[in-house]
């Protein structure tokens, strides 16, 4: 093997790497049971439902989780649901903003405050969830854009 010109090795590696680009293998993509359950749960929601979606990830897990967040947002917006985004991790607010801008603004042309809202980060984990359940207006007085909650159209009727 020591007598083989290394250029031949590079050529063989290049061919092996490039081959699937020209002739894809066509591997089947099957959703996992939990992925299918989430998809079905979103499909089962009545049209125009109000959905609270929490973004709990940061840059270190973005390559793994962000595509799922994008897919969930697309599915929610395709079905005409309103999305209320919140974050219990500080970095989650930046991830949520990026996902919402990509899907809601750029892909669907939705209106902030009417179709979706980013309430933002609040520290406290379980306490925040309890606060949202009891009275979201006490937990969030302004959203991530510093707009008072009372001035956001989709917050009407939400306690």
Image (cartoon, rainbow, N blue to C red):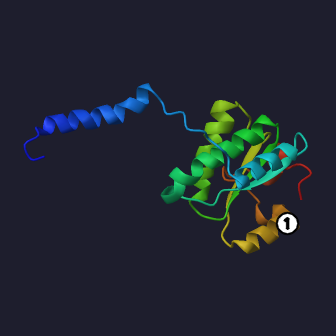
**Left or right, residue 141 beside residue 145:** right
**How busy is the neighbourhood of tag 1: few (under 14 within 10 Å), some, or many (20 plus)?**
few
Q: Residue at x 89, y 54 (%)?
A: 158
Can you tell which quarter of the image residue 113 is in?
top right
Which of the pair 70/34 is nearer the observer?
34
Q: Is residue 151 left or right of residue 107?
A: right
Residue at 70%, 51% in the rendered image? 35
Question: Residue 137 falls in which quadrant of the image?
Answer: bottom right
Q: Is residue 153 above or below residue 32?
A: above
Report the residue marked by disc 1.
Answer: 133
Instruction: Residue 125 in the image: state x and y as whole percent.
Output: 69, 71
Q: Indicate the quadrant where residue 7 lies.
A: top left
- Tell me if 71 is positioned left or right of 13 in this view: right
- What residue is drawn where x is 68% and y is 65%? 122
In the rendered image, the vertical position of residue 135 relative to residue 118, given as above or below: below
- The residue positioned 80% from the left and 69% from the top of the image is 131
- Of the pair 125 and 113, the residue shown nearer to us: 125
Q: Residue 41: give x, y in percent of width and height.
A: 82, 50
Q: Nearer the viewer, residue 117 or 80?
A: 80
Residue 66 in the image: state x and y as whole percent: 58, 49
Q: Is residue 152 visible?
A: no
Res 50 visible: yes
Q: Secondary structure at mark 1?
A: helix
How many numbered discs?
A: 1
């Amino acid at each position: 093997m020591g007598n083989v010109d290394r250029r031949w090795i590079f050529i063989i590696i290049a061919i092996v790497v490039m081959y699937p680009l020209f002739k894809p293998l066509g591997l089947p993509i099957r959703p996992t049971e939990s992925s299918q359950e989430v998809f079905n749960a979103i499909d089962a929601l009545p049209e125009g439902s109000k959905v609270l979606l929490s973004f709990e990830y940061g840059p270190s897990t973005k390559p793994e989780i962000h595509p799922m967040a994008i897919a969930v947002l697309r599915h929610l917006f395709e079905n005409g649901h309103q999305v209320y985004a919140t974050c219990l991790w500080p970095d989650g607010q930046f991830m949520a903003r990026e996902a919402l801008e990509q899907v809601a603004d750029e892909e669907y042309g939705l209106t902030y405050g009417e179709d979706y809202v980013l309430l933002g980060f609040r520290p406290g984990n379980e306490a925040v969830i309890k606060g949202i359940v009891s009275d979201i207006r006490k937990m969030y007085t302004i959203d991530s854009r510093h707009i008072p909650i009372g001035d956001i159209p989709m917050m009407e009727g939400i306690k």
